[in-house]
Amino acid sequence: MSKHKAVEPTHTAAHRPSPATIAGRAYEIFLDRGGHHGHNLEDWLQAERELLSGQARPSAKNLPLGLRLLE
C-alpha cells in the first residue's frame, strides 16, 4: 500500500462549465470585441479559461434566446 496521497485533479467533470455556459461567455467576448467574426476558437478557449479560473460568470442579459434556453 502506497503512503503517497493521490493527486486530485483541479477541475472535475462535475465542476466544469457546461458547453452552453462556455458558449454564452464566448458570445459576450465576441460582443466585447465589437462582433468581429473569425475568432470563435480563441473566444471559446478564453471563455473556458475564465470560467474554470472563476474570473467570469456569464450573464443571460446579452445572450441570444437559443443560448438562454440551454442554461
Image (tube, rainbow, N blue to C red):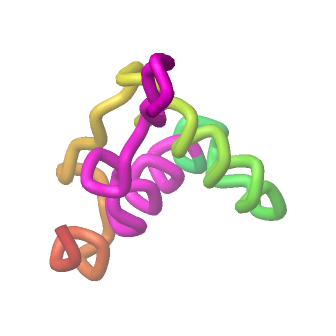
**Residue 60: x, y in percent?**
19, 52
Which quadrant of the structure image shows residue 20? Answer: bottom left
Q: Residue at x 44, y 55 (%)?
A: 22
User: Foreground residue, 48 or 67?
Assistant: 48
Q: Is residue 10 visible?
A: no
**Residue 47: x, y in percent?**
53, 42
Q: 18 above or below 58? A: below
Q: Residue at x 16, y 78 (%)?
A: 69
Q: Is residue 57 left or right of residue 5?
A: left
Q: 18 above or below 16? A: below
26 in the magenta segment = yes
Q: Is residue 70 left or right of residue 42?
A: left
User: Foreground residue, 57 or 4?
Assistant: 4
- Residue furthest to the front: 1
Q: Is residue 16 visible?
A: yes
User: Where does the N terminus fall, quadrant-wise?
Assistant: top left
5 in the magenta segment = yes
User: Where does the C terminus fall, quadrant-wise?
Assistant: bottom left
Which quadrant of the structure image shows residue 36? Answer: bottom right
Q: 61 above or below 46? A: below
Find the magenta span and give its range: 1-29
**Residue 64: x, y in percent?**
32, 70
